[in-house]
Amino acid sequence: MVSERWRVSRARGAAIAEVGAAITPGRSLLGQPEECALPAIAAALEPSTDTTGHPDGFTLPRAALSVDAAAIIVHELRNTERICGTQALQAAAGLAVEHAAGAPLHDVTRIAKLVRTRLDQDGIEPRDDLLRMSERCTIRELPNGMTQLRAELAPENAAGLREQGIGR
């Protein structure tokens, strides 16, 4: 919808929508207001009046972050929200905004990835725990007497079945 309305690419529209979702205060199931997920990014997108560098003294509103820079940071932080708490995520967003304010986009990308890496210091291990928690398996008898097995398994559990010769 955003891409059609503003006549931008779908990728840019998705990035704008992702930033909007991260900086917009939400409502709980009971309708009570909740704070936005990343208030540091919301504050950095607010324009401030800056008169420095303007010979005529004009005030031009300028935000610390562009929407593109905010989209990069939000995207990287979304990759870590399952493994860290809200406070750590908000602190990381504040740190990313502090270092990325006014930086070119290629630097913002490096900063956001560095912040994401700092949040995910344990690396792959927590993700393996998440995979194990989301495993599922169904076994069902078919009318012809065969048994149907469907499973979504974490890599190490799937490897164990493959060693047994199952699933070839």
Image (spheres, helix red, strand yellow):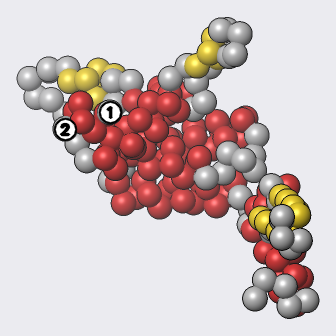
- Give percent across and percent down for residue 108: 42, 53
**Residue located 64% across and 36% down the image:** 90
Residue tagged 2? 7
Callout 1: few (<14), some (14-19), or many (20+) C-alpha neighbours within 10 Å? few
**Residue located 29% across and 20% down the image:** 49
Image side of residue 119 versus residue 110, left or right: right
What SS does tag 1 mark?
loop
Which quadrant holds residue 38?
top right
Give the number of callouts: 2
Q: Are marks 1 and 2 in contact (CB under 8 Å)?
A: no
Label 1 vs 2, first from the N-terminus? 1
- Position of the N terminus, as image quadrant, is top left
Farthest residue, direction left: 56
User: Residue 116 bears which disc, if any?
Assistant: none
Residue tagged 1? 1
Image side of residue 125 versus residue 99, left or right: right
- Give percent across and percent down for residue 110: 47, 61
| Amino acid found under the numbered disc labelled 1 | Met
What SS does tag 2 mark?
loop
Nearest the viewer among 56 and 30 is 30
CA–CA distance in space, label 1 to label 2: 10 Å
- Position of the C terminus, as image quadrant, is bottom right
Image side of residue 6 versus residue 121, left or right: left
Callout 2: few (<14), some (14-19), or many (20+) C-alpha neighbours within 10 Å? few
